[in-house]
Amino acid sequence: MDILGIVASPRKNGNTEVLVNEALKEAANLGAETRLWTVADKNIEGCTSCFACIPSGDCVIDDDMNELYPLLQQADGIIFGSPVYFWNVTSQAKAIIDRTFNLWITKSLKGKVGGAIACTWTRGTTPALQAINTFFSIQGMYTGGGFDVTVSGYCETVAPGTLITTGLEADGKTPHNDPWAQARECAQEMVNLINKLKR
């Protein structure tokens, strides 16, 4: 079982990366092979709607998406994380999503399992998660409510590499207030579903 974590943040070691890594660590503990791919320092151009990928499925744009395509195709599960920028996913996340039109043509992601992670300071996780889950749905992937990690009260821009609370405390008793527990639960449910699908 292969699970790919995508961090669609232009900043290295931010909170989104911390949580995607937490989910991947839990997936690895459950026996999955995991890989992290971050958009930071990558060159990802936007889709030009040239339709050159029809019918072969090969994108003609030569950039760092060429690293990501085989990882997406190989993975059984994809954890897609984005910080919230202006009440939605980052422009880098949207570019990645748009550039998988060629994989929609070939149905390469159909039947895979997707999990979404969105980090924000105050609000905007709902439209961000909706964007990611819509991507999964259009690609014919399996998703579930338990696969979403919604982190409000944590700011990507405050402390790269560490989650700093800004009014929301993880008390250890209420999992919805603990982003690390949410990330682990996301991985647990994804691994469970992938195992069921493989059987």
Image: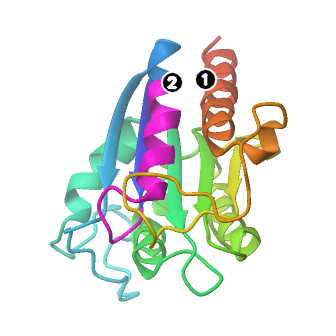
Q: Which mark is residue 191?
A: 1
Specify the principal SS of the magenta part: helix
Q: How many numbered badges does the structure rendering display?
A: 2
Question: Where is residue 47, by image quadrant?
Answer: bottom left
Residue 22 falls inside the magenta stretch: yes
Left or right of 107 in this view: 125: right
- Rendered location of residue 22, percent (x, y): 49, 36
- Rendered location of residue 44, percent (x, y): 27, 74
Local SS, label 1: helix
Left or right of 23 in this view: 67: left
How was the colour assigned to the protein in this rendering? Answer: rainbow
Residue type of the residue flagged with mark 2: Ala
Q: Residue at x 60, y 54 (%)?
A: 117
Give the CA separation, mark 1 to mark 2: 7 Å
**Earlier residue among tags 1 and 2:** 2
Question: Where is residue 139, by image quadrant?
Answer: bottom right
Q: Is residue 156 above or below residue 72?
A: below
Q: Residue at x 48, y 15 (%)?
A: 29
- Rendered location of residue 199, percent (x, y): 65, 10
Label 1 with label 2: CB-CB less than 8 Å: yes
- Rendered location of residue 108, percent (x, y): 46, 47
Q: Is residue 183 visible?
A: yes
Extent of the magenta region: 8-26
Left or right of 119 in this view: 19: left
Q: Is residue 41 above or below residue 186?
A: below
Residue 113 falls inside the magenta stretch: no
Q: Which residue is mark 2?
A: 27
